[in-house]
Image (tube, rainbow, N blue to C red):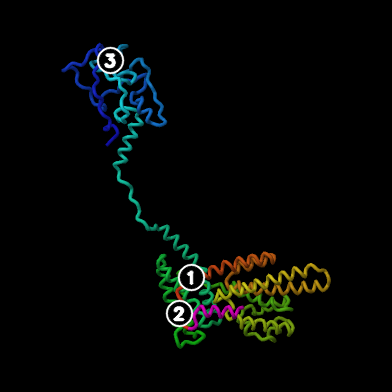
Amino acid sequence: MSIFTRVKKPAPIDPAPGNGGARREGSHPLPAPLTQQSPPPRANGVHPLLVPRPSEAASSPGLAPRTAPASGPAHHASSAPTSKTNGASNGTAPRPSNGLAAKAAPTAKPPAVRDPASGPIDLVIEMALEADASEEEPPAIPASGTSTAADQAAVRATFEDLAVPYMAEVRGLMMELQYGEVQSSWFELARPLVRSLRKIADPVGHAALAEALEKFDQAIGDLLAPGQTAVPSPAAREALMMAYAPLRARLPPAFEVEGERDRREPLIVRALLEQVPGLEPVALEALVAAGFGKLRALHAARADEIAAVSGVGPGVAAAIAARIEAFRRTTPAGLASVDQLATLRNLERLRDVLRTQHAAFDAVGRGWSEQDQSAKRQARRERQVTFLHVAIDLLRLGEITFVQRLEKLPFTSKLDELTRFIGRALQTERGKSRSAPPPPTSAATPTTRREEGIDRHG
């Protein structure tokens, strides 16, 4: 319904006696409807609908009452001449110019009724719009719990970001399986993580990834089945690699191992060789150039072969071979950490040792005697060797950028940064333990092997 159909027709007003007489029966007909008759006369050039009633002006906030002058020429749109008196023209009753009723009309104050037939035009429009709005149906409210496509995409992105650190141990195992020697029991640690990620992948929209994780879990189960060897057979290795390939295709940041060995191994080998006393940087570079920059080549090398290639003396060559053998014995997985919790516990122990050695270095550094200078060199060497052990553990965790940043910091800052890193990493490991399914009931549970790893590294 439009605005103008809501406007009422004005009732005819009987003129007061003496002002032209009342309209007699049978005289001029009633005026045409408001939409067809000519515009009503204006008072002082102002449309009567724009002059608010006193009651409307008082009840409308911010609307100041405007009162038309008591007298003045009344302009009419018709061609009839205007009169200075209040007489009727063409038999119609004149509209009072001050907005009040005629003398014969009651002088009582009209009630404050919002009549759309009179008053300001903005009031008429407002009432019409309110009436139209009340007839409209309220907008539909989305059902509770409904997620949009953007919400689902954000959930998948968060899942993918969290899967990268969550699968660090799995990536390390597969890298060791591809380039080194592994033990079948190591995969007991990875299986709860694989199952936990599979449980989450399907609800967030990674159905294909969940299916690939299911097949990889089955391959791990075949490897851990009763009667299998402690070291995976060639057939078991091939089955694991084939089951792992779809994971690399579905979510490369979380499962890709290509290129990771080339980033870690040279840094780990250098950190090992720098721990050997008496090995000069030139001899170290000669060893790397001769093909001893890989762990497998160093494991197979004898002391005399190392001396012949690098040109170092027999004592240094024997020290190199002994250091590589000790690392192989205490750290079977040389490229990656297959038990991150055990590695972090070992990092805590090394951090404490490093703090003690740094305090000792500061203490002996205050003296200037020859004995103090010798003690200072010894303390610096011990501190540096411990830091190299820290760097190797961090590299096995995949923290290559962090190690490179630590090397440029003073030792006090090294200790602070290392403490913060260990705290964050331990919190992540605790979150993994809470989200992982209950461990198997076999004697060699992941928890038992984690404790064994702490004893071995500690």
- Marks 2 and 3, Cα distance to the nearest angstrom? 107 Å
Determine which of the numbered discs, if any, sits on residue 80 in the image: 3
Looking at the rendering, the stretch of residues picked out in magenta corresponds to: 443-458
Mark 2 is on which residue type? Pro
- Give the residue displayed 70% in from the left and 85% down from the top: 318
Q: Is residue 328 magenta?
A: no
- Marks 1 and 2, Cα distance to the nearest angstrom? 15 Å
Q: Position of residue 201 (x, y in %)?
A: 43, 68
Residue at the far bottom: name it: 227
Mark 3 is on which residue type? Ala
Q: Decide: marks 1, 2 in contact (CB < 8 A)? A: no
Instruction: Look at discs 1 and 3 and give the one toward the viewer.
Output: 1
Residue indicated by mark 1? 434
Query: Predominant secondary structure in magenta?
Result: helix
| SS at circle 3 | loop
Image height of 299 relative to 385, above or below? below
Residue indicated by mark 2? 440
Residue at the far right: name it: 369
Instruction: Look at discs 2 and 3 and give the one toward the viewer.
Output: 2
- Residue 64 seen in the figure: yes
